[in-house]
Image: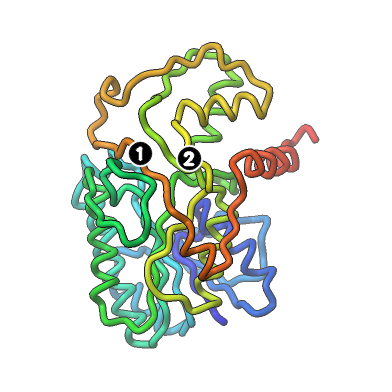
Amino acid sequence: MKILVTGSNGLLGQKILAQGIQDPDLEIVACSKGPDRVESISGYTYFELDICDRQAVIDLITSQLPDVVINTAAMTNVDACESDKDLCWQVNVDAVGYMIEACKKIKSQLIHLSTDFVFNGEAGPYAETDEPKPLSYYGRSKHASEALLVNSGLEHWAIARTIIVYGIAENMSRTNVVLWAKGALEKGEPIRVVDDQFRSPTLAEDLAAGCILIAKKKANGIFHLSGKDTMSILELVNRVAGHFGLDAGKVEPIKTASLGQPAARPPRTGFVLDKAIHELGYAPHSFEDGLVILAEQLDRTDPKN
């Protein structure tokens, strides 16, 4: 099976590459904007691709003839999406339309990554059948991209929704909440953390494995792929502190409203994972086990070791 991964320079993209090249049944083609930033992984073919360039998307997909396209590329900075709606729509919606167009031409499956932010957070945890009601422009863009796929007429398609993904990768362009918390706690500086947002943090390796399971099983429809533990962001930070032996004494609990962020956040999400577990064999780690894996990876990449 040939899998083409968009956004391969990102955290999830790199994890899919790492797992995909270890599978003898898979051939991996990677693409991202700009040069390949992954130096420690080999065994795949790389192409530069701007997913906002319709013709480039169609040309690459139709020339490579993948069985599956996994679209991990997105504009995910929620507040930036609120302030630059045009770019958000181009990346998160229009580009997905180009991929659908290309996949239709070669009858390949499209697996598209989406988010818990399609929900308003009033009734979490959410199942795949619950009705999306996004609060932010980011959430609306992802919901619109989902609708494109659902109504596309594409024979094989899947939507993989997830929740705050954490982990480490090479030359990361942005951090994630676990690494941010660890770094801030290590500095010992006062940090303000919301205690009224609840999420299920997702280990990047688990999400990558879920995407590959969807591809190999040719599964269709919407799947919720996240961690299995739901907690407040404050609890998340405190658990990171406990795991790494750091002092959480300078963590100040605050309410979301006090931040004055441009984009609204859903207060409580979390996912019901039954469908992914039973239909895919999805087996996410607990948050504590995920932190153990992350700590081992950080240890291996520490130049002092």
Query: Going by the picture, which residue comes out furthest to the right?
Result: 305
Q: Position of residue 13 (x, y in %)?
A: 52, 59
Q: Quadrant of residue 305?
A: top right
Contact between labelled residues 2 and 1, with CB atoms less than 8 Å apart: yes
Q: Residues within 10 Å of mark 1 (few under 14, many from 20)?
A: many
- Residue occupying the point 68% across, 56% down: 40
Residue 87 seen by the camera: no
Q: Quadrant of residue 288?
A: top right
Q: Which residue is mark 2?
A: 230
- Residue occupying the point 57% across, 14% down: 188
The N terminus sits in image quarter = bottom right
Query: Going by the picture, which residue comes out furthest to the bottom?
Result: 106
What is the total number of numbered labels drawn onto the structure image? 2
| Amino acid carrying mark 2 in the image | Thr
Q: Is residue 81 left or right of residue 294?
A: left
Q: Position of residue 218 (x, y in %)?
A: 48, 79
SS state under label 1 = loop
Q: Is residue 241 above or below residue 266?
A: above
Colour setup of the view: rainbow
- Residue occupying the point 62% across, 49% down: 285
Q: Position of residue 211 (x, y in %)?
A: 51, 65
SS state under label 2 = loop
| Amino acid carrying mark 1 in the image | Arg
Given residues 213 and 26, the one toward you in this image is: 213
- Residue occupying the point 48% across, 56% down: 273
Q: CA distance from mark 1 to mark 2?
A: 9 Å
Q: Residues within 10 Å of mark 2 (few under 14, many from 20)?
A: many
Lower position in the chain sequence, tag 1 or tag 2: 2
Residue 201 seen by the camera: yes
Q: Which residue is mark 1?
A: 268
